[in-house]
Image (cartoon, rainbow, N blue to C red):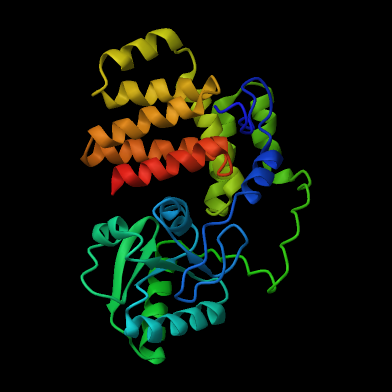
Amino acid sequence: MSAQGPQPSFNPYGAVDLGALAARRSAAPAAPGGGGNGATAGAAAGGYVVEVSEVTFQADVVERSTAVPVVVDFWADWCQPCKQLTPILEKLAAEYAGRFVLASIDVDANQRIAAAAQVQSIPTVIAVVGGQALPLFQGALPEAQVRQYLEALLAEAARLGITGTAPAPAPEGETPAEPAEPPNDPRYDAAYDAIERGDLDAAAQAYRALLADSPADADAAAGLAQVELLQRTAGVDPATARAAADADPEDVDKALVAADLDLLDNAAEAAFGRLVDTVRRSSGDDRERVRKRLLELFEVVGSADPAVVKARAALTSALF
């Protein structure tokens, strides 16, 4: 891990510090802004509209869609119908008050994303729910029709269990308040106690129970990712595992084990780089396994860590 970045908030010999994880996640930098199509709110500051680039696509669209539906508006400055549709989408995003997030993507500045989404003309609007893309419509539709598409989307998202709500934007000109240190939450006591006594299986079970009740609980997801990392690496000899992975870079299983061990040694950049390289070399189910493992390791380190920000950009490039 970079010497200047924060260290992972877990201790293999003690309790997971979920409070520190939550505080670090809330301090994540805002996505780049300043486009000309009307998007106004950054993801880290909360809000219902976010401008998305290749750097932020993975976090602001794919990962966010596991908690709340994301509606993606593909546009360009020269597109007159886009200038008719986008205000309608932004109005409805505010009206629906976080039941979906509107992601604004300038196709001229983000051609690889547009190509991956198979955008043939603009405006094009798709949805991403649970990491999966769903086509919505093309062209500048009237508000009533757009609303119908959104209602159908929200019904489908609810069927899939994606029912989170995005945070409200801060009032204009007001900087969001620094989050207070969260108090101890008794819901996590069972997981903490299990970790303290070295019972990782019980800790994982406790976190999974929390996630079954609250699928969008980011702290429980981070805790589970940390515990599963410790479970996977228990009894594994680091030198042997890394040597095996280096000798056979095409073996996905060996790369996954070596990356886990890299992270445990606080070498997050090495872990992420190893898996991004594996994504580039792999395909199909193997590629998806590696992508999911990367996202789990991002949870362990925290989204504000510079190594995670850099690796997300590299992952997007490898995928698209």
Which residue is at 54% across, 28% downward?
A: 201
Which residue is at 63% across, 69% downward?
A: 168
In the picture shown, does residue 73 fall above or below 88?
above
State the count of labels.
0
Q: Is residue 224 visible?
A: no
In the picture shown, does residue 26 fall above or below 100?
above
In this view of the protein, which residue sits in the foreground, 95 or 223? 95
In this view of the protein, which residue sits in the foreground, 221 or 95? 95
Q: Position of residue 218 (x, y in %)?
A: 58, 48
Q: Position of residue 123 (x, y in %)?
A: 31, 77
Which residue is at 67% across, 36% downward?
A: 190
In this view of the protein, which residue sits in the foreground, 122 or 300? 122
The N terminus, quarter of image: top right
Q: Position of residue 29 (x, y in %)?
A: 59, 51
Q: Is 176 situated left or right of 155 in this image? A: right
In the picture shown, does residue 145 fall above or below 11?
below
In this view of the protein, which residue sits in the foreground, 232 or 124? 124
The picture quadrant where one finds residue 120 is: bottom left
Q: Is residue 14 visible?
A: yes
Q: Is 275 situated left or right of 118 in this image? A: right
The picture quadrant where one finds residue 202 is: top right
The picture quadrant where one finds residue 57 is: bottom left
Which residue is at 27% across, 36% downward?
A: 280
Q: Position of residue 153 (x, y in %)?
A: 38, 73
Q: Is 279 situated left or right of 155 in this image? A: left
